[in-house]
Amino acid sequence: MFDEINNDFDTISENFKKIKSLTPTIEQVCKICTESIKKGGKVMFCGNGGSAADSQHLAAELVGRYKMNRPALNSIALTTDTSILTAIGNDFGYDTIFERQVEGLGKKGDILVGLSTSGNSKNVLLAMKKAKEMGIKTVAFTGESGGKMKDSADYAINVPSDTTNHIQEMHIAVGHIICGYIEKALAPKVKALFLDRDGTINEDYGFTYQTEKLDFIDGIFELCKKAQDKGFKIFVITNQSGVDRGYYTLEQMNAFNDYMKAEFKKQGIEITDIYCCPYLEHPDRKPLPGMFLKAQNRYNIDMAASVAVGDKERDVEAALNAGVKKTYLFSKEAKESKGKIISKLTDVKF
């Protein structure tokens, strides 16, 4: 059993190495889907069985969220409406269940993505034929042979396997890559105000975690209100090695952060997110940029247009390492810094 599992992983690994040869086609599909949605079109997915599940999964990533918070994107799986599927199947035949929906829901400029491990699913082939008649570009997700779909689609992604489960593994991975590209391309860019916590937002009493010791530093509310008025989202980026050192627990750290957010809210200020590194050694620990980059990836932050403020040089270095151009060191003692030294938070310029 152990060897069988290892062999399966070896096969999967080899498949994913081979699939890189399809990168140029995948890139083209990313671009046509993005352009379609940008111009008011949509991406439609269809398939049978596991491919139906993948269709629903990928449409959900676009309408809902893949990685980042952003407006919904126009997409639909033609596999989900049981009334439509059973009515068409009963009245016209199962082979037409997707074709009929393309005719009724599709329009010129849309994209149809058909998924079939064999590449020969008749209902998907008929849907793609109808799509082409209507000026809808077609994309085929198939296995290595490509089947009939390989020649009927505008873009064919024939993943390098002839085994159903491995084909499906690669289909969902490719679909995720495409969803990620679309999302990043179309999500609005966010300007961020990145704030260190202890010593910048609140007085630093040394591994501060008790809510009764939350004393806000003068000017922090004014700074955040000014940032909000200028369209900046507010993020807290904080090293919290007190957890790793055993001074307090993750639950106590989170309780402090929740209490702090609530106090900001009372002032009409929304903290979009808080990123904490509770470890002494970790890629997220400042001066490394990990927490900044996680925020950037989730919220599509324009780092060059963002601002960072901290009370230690490592705060400045982490922000610079993440691509933030405007950085401030909040200190009454510092003589030099890679950022601009300020003695009042209200001196921050946007």
Image (cartoon, helix red, strand yellow):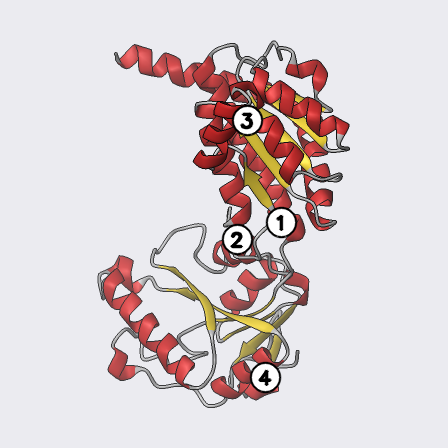
Q: Are marks 2 and 1 in contact (CB under 8 Å)?
A: yes
304 left or right of 236 in image = right
Question: Element under label 1?
Answer: helix
| Camera-nearest residue between 315 and 5 | 5
Binning the other alpha carbons within 10 Å of mark 1 as few (below 14), some (14 to 19) or many (20 upward) gives some
- Please state the total of marks drawn on the protein image: 4
**Alpha carbon distance from label 2 to label 4:** 25 Å
Binning the other alpha carbons within 10 Å of mark 2 as few (below 14), some (14 to 19) or many (20 upward) gives some
Q: Are marks 1 and 4 in contact (CB under 8 Å)?
A: no
Q: For the point 68% across and 39% down, which residue is it? A: 33
Residue behind mark 2: 68
| Camera-nearest residue between 336 and 174 | 174
Residue behind mark 1: 184
Residue behind mark 4: 226
Name the amino acid, label 1. Answer: Lys
Mark 1 or mark 4: which is in front? 1
- Tell me which label, 1 or 3, sits earlier in the chain: 3
**Alpha carbon distance from label 2 to label 3:** 33 Å
